[in-house]
Amino acid sequence: MVWQGFLVAAGGFLGATLRYGITRWLGKKASGGFPYGTLTVNLLGSFLLGWLTGTGFGSAALLFLGTGFTGAFTTFSTLNWESLQAGRAAAALNLTVSYTVGILLAFAGYWAGGGLS
């Protein structure tokens, strides 16, 4: 039981650290206040979680990569907060792209992982 918590914590540390780096890097590259960093990590995370599910990894890998890494890498609270801060038109675009493309990428990841074979 303790080792499972360690796997989640270690994956979470890596996911949160990578999310921070990507959002900072894309924040410096983009202008206009649109939250490209959060959009990017959420879409990548959607694909990754779909792929992990489709591949049939064992429970330890799912704890580390799925629950820990992907759970910390993606962020629902930041998505909503940044959408509110961006203004009505940008919020609508951000939420629509995040959810629609996120679901499609999760499906694509699941398919790529062999989940529909």
Image: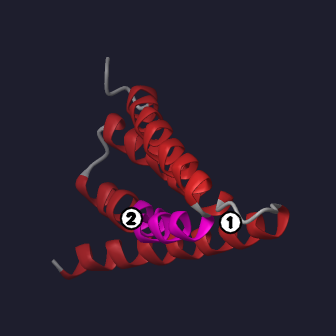
Which residue does the image show at 41% across and 70% down from the upper left? 77
Which residue does the image show at 24% across and 55% down from the upper left? 59
Question: Which residue occupies the extreme front position in the image?
Answer: 88
The kind of residue on which mark 2 rests is Gly
Reading the image, the residue beneath label 1 is: 22
Q: Relative to residue 70, is residue 6 drawn left or right?
A: left
Secondary element under disc 1, as helix, strand or loop, is: helix
Image quarter where the C terminus lies is top left
Q: Which mark is residue 2?
A: none
Q: Nearer the viewer, residue 99 or 63?
A: 99
Task: Indicate whether 101 appears above or below 67.
Answer: above
**Residue 113, position in %: x, y?**
41, 32
Q: Relative to residue 21, is residue 8 drawn left or right?
A: left
Residue neighbourhood size for the residue with mark 2, other residues' Cα within 10 Å, grouped as few (<14), some (14–19), many (≥20):
many
Which residue does the image show at 60% across and 51% down from the upper left? 89
Which residue does the image show at 48% across and 78% down from the upper left? 13
| Marks 1 & 2, CB-CB < 8 Å contact | no
Q: Is residue 59 magenta?
A: no
**Residue 60, position in %: x, y?**
28, 60
Task: Indicate whether 87 appears above or below 103.
Answer: below
Image quarter where the N terminus lies is bottom left
Reading the image, the residue beneath label 2 is: 71
Question: Which residue occupies the extreme top position in the image?
Answer: 117
Q: Relative to residue 53, is residue 113 drawn left or right?
A: right
Secondary element under disc 2, as helix, strand or loop, is: helix
Segment tinted magenta in the rendering: 69-86
**Residue 24, position in %: x, y?**
72, 73
Q: Is residue 77 magenta?
A: yes
Q: Relative to residue 85, is residue 78 drawn left or right?
A: left
Task: Indicate whether 20 appears above or below 91.
Answer: below
Q: Nearer the viewer, residue 106 or 90?
A: 90
The kind of residue on which mark 1 rests is Ile
